[in-house]
Image (cartoon, helix red, strand yellow):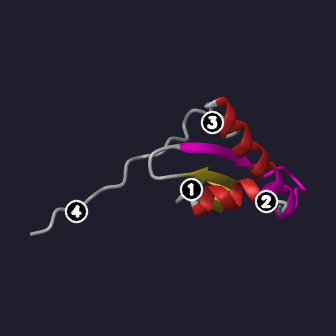
Amino acid sequence: MNEYSQLTTFIEAGGHITIGRVAPIEGVAIAANDTQVFAVLKRREQESLLELLGRLEAALLQATYSGEPVNEVGPEFVLEQPSVRRRR
């Protein structure tokens, strides 16, 4: 089993992760699917990308088993439903 098996399983099941800037927040890691955010982590000062991925792996595991998302950013971060354009 690889070091990031939870993330791998999550992505293979249709989930996605985002790492980087999500305006206005610098340095975040997000694990979500089309309907739910499981984890939002803020990158710590001097934290490497691999360390952040390791924390995202652990947060995703915690959220999966507890049913509660892990959110280090705060309640202002929410998943909005994608907009759908009507065909003419």
Q: Which mark lies nearer to you, 3 or 2?
A: 2
Q: Which mark lies nearer to you, 4 or 2?
A: 2
Question: Which secondary structure, mark 2?
Answer: loop
Q: Which mark lies nearer to you, 1 or 2?
A: 2
Task: Indicate which disc residue 23 carries.
Answer: 1
Question: Which secondary structure, mark 4?
Answer: loop
Q: Residue at x 83, y 50 (%)?
A: 44
Separation of disc 4 and disc 2 at Cα? Answer: 36 Å
Q: Is residue 47 left or right of residue 59?
A: right
- Answer yes or no: is residue 20 visible: no
Residue type of the residue flagged with mark 4? Arg
Separation of disc 4 and disc 1 at Cα? Answer: 23 Å
Q: Which residues are magenta?
A: 37-54
Task: Please give the residue where the numbered disc 2 appears in the rendered image.
Answer: 4
Dividing the image into 4 quarters, which one contains the C terminus? Answer: bottom left
Task: Please give the residue where the numbered disc 4 appears in the rendered image.
Answer: 85
Separation of disc 3 and disc 2 at Cα? Answer: 19 Å
* Mark closest to the chain's N terminus, 3 or 4: 3
Residue 58 lies in magenta, yes or no? no
Instruction: Give neighbour class at mark 4: few <14, some 14-19, many 20+ (Cα, 10 Å).
Output: few
* Mark closest to the chain's N terminus, 4 or 1: 1
